[in-house]
Amino acid sequence: QVQVVESGGGLVQPGGSLRLSCAASGTIFRLVGVGWHRQAPGKERELVAGITIGGDTNYADPVKGRFTISRDNAKNTVYLQMNSLKPEDTAVYYCNVNNGRMRFWGKGTLVTISS
């Protein structure tokens, strides 16, 4: 059974930074694609950033230039470095792991941007 666990969320002031981690077990991590999604109160879940098996990345327009997704296959972990955070980045951030047959979600980590 694939398990996905997010960590690294918290309360940060506007302009600050956070690094989220997504750790997956029960799968060959180097063979999965991974996406970070977020869901703000009252809004639908949206894709923030993704990284493929080969390391190609994509970003949603609102976070381009501020967020960076990366992976460390030796640690079975994908990171989301978030800089220049804004109040509108406040959301629960979820990690999605895709092994080509199924998608697996973590329970999310809360990110709150507030002064």
Image: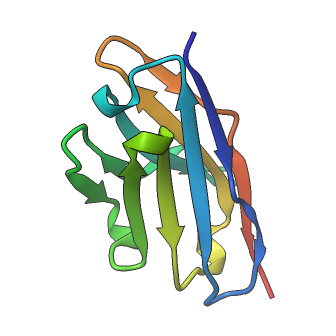
The residue depicted at 53 percent of the width and 17 percent of the height is: 26
- What's the residue at 52%, 72% (across, down)? 82
Q: How many marks?
A: 0
Residue 96's place in the image compared with 9, above or below, is above
Residue at figure coordinates x 34%, y 48% from the top left: 50
Residue 40: quadrant of the picture: bottom right
Front residue of 76/87: it is 76
Q: Nearer the viewer, residue 114 or 76?
A: 76
**Residue closer to the observer: 49 or 91:** 49
Q: Quadrant of the N terminus?
A: top right
For residue 49, side relative to residue 24 (left or right): left
For residue 44, say whether it is visible: no
Quadrant location of residue 61? bottom left
> x, y percentage for residue 32?
34, 29
Q: Is residue 98 visible?
A: yes
Residue appearing at x 39%, y 67% in the figure: 68
Q: Position of residue 11 (x, y in %)?
A: 80, 72
Image coloring type: rainbow
Please identify the quadrant where the C terminus is shown.
bottom right
Q: Residue furthest front?
A: 74
Q: Nearer the viewer, residue 81 or 38?
A: 81
Find residue 52 and report its horizontal and vertical position in percent: 25, 41
